[in-house]
Amino acid sequence: MRILVLGVGNILLTDEAIGVRIVEALEQRYILPDYVEILDGGTAGMELLGDMANRDHLIIADAIVSKKNTPGTMMILRDEEVPALFTNKISPHQ
């Protein structure tokens, strides 16, 4: 099994950095099994495709704007839900 936990975001924009801060906290606080890789993706976009390829599971931590939820709400999107939410690509890491 190969799992990637990918944190994305811009650390210069405070709340936009949440994905990066999450993976930093995971690395500092937990000893994860060898099959789990933690990656700070920053604001990289297409460059991350190779890292995401051939994974059994991909967990992405990121900040998003949602009209349905209040700030700070954790959303879990699976499979087909992801492309439906991101119809407008407005930042490099989306």
Image (tube, helix red, strand yellow):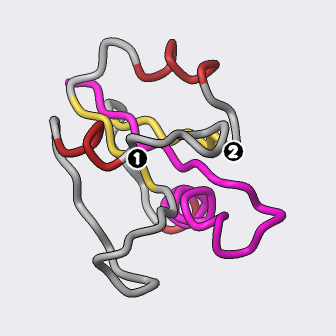
Magenta stretch: includes residue 70: no
For image coordinates 50% across by 17% down, the residue present is: 49
How many dots with numbers?
Answer: 2
Labelled disc at residue 60 = 1
Labelled disc at residue 42 = 2
Residue 43 falls in image quadrant:
top right
Secondary structure beneath dot 1 equals strand
Residue 5 falls in image quadrant:
top left
**Considering only vertical position in the picture, is 26 above or below 34?**
below
The image position of residue 68, as x and y in percent, is: 28, 77
Secondary structure beneath dot 2 equals strand
Q: Is residue 36 left or right of residue 7?
A: left
Question: Which residue range is magenta in the image?
Answer: 1-27
Q: First in sequence: mark 1 or mark 2?
A: 2
- Distance Cα–Cα, label 1 vs label 2: 12 Å
**Considering only vertical position in the picture, is 67 above or below 34?**
below
The image position of residue 71, as x and y in percent, is: 45, 84
The image position of residue 76, as x and y in percent, is: 23, 60
Mark 2 is on which residue type?
Answer: Gly
Mark 1 is on which residue type?
Answer: Ile
For image coordinates 49% across by 57% down, the residue present is: 62
Circle 1 crowding by C-alpha within 10 Å: few under 14, some 14–19, many from 20: some
Are discs 1 and 2 less than 8 Å apart at CB?
Answer: no
Q: Please name the predominant secondary structure of the magenta segment in the image.
A: helix
Residue sitting nearer the eye, 37 or 92: 92
In the rendered image, which quarter contains the N terminus? top left
Magenta stretch: includes residue 10: yes
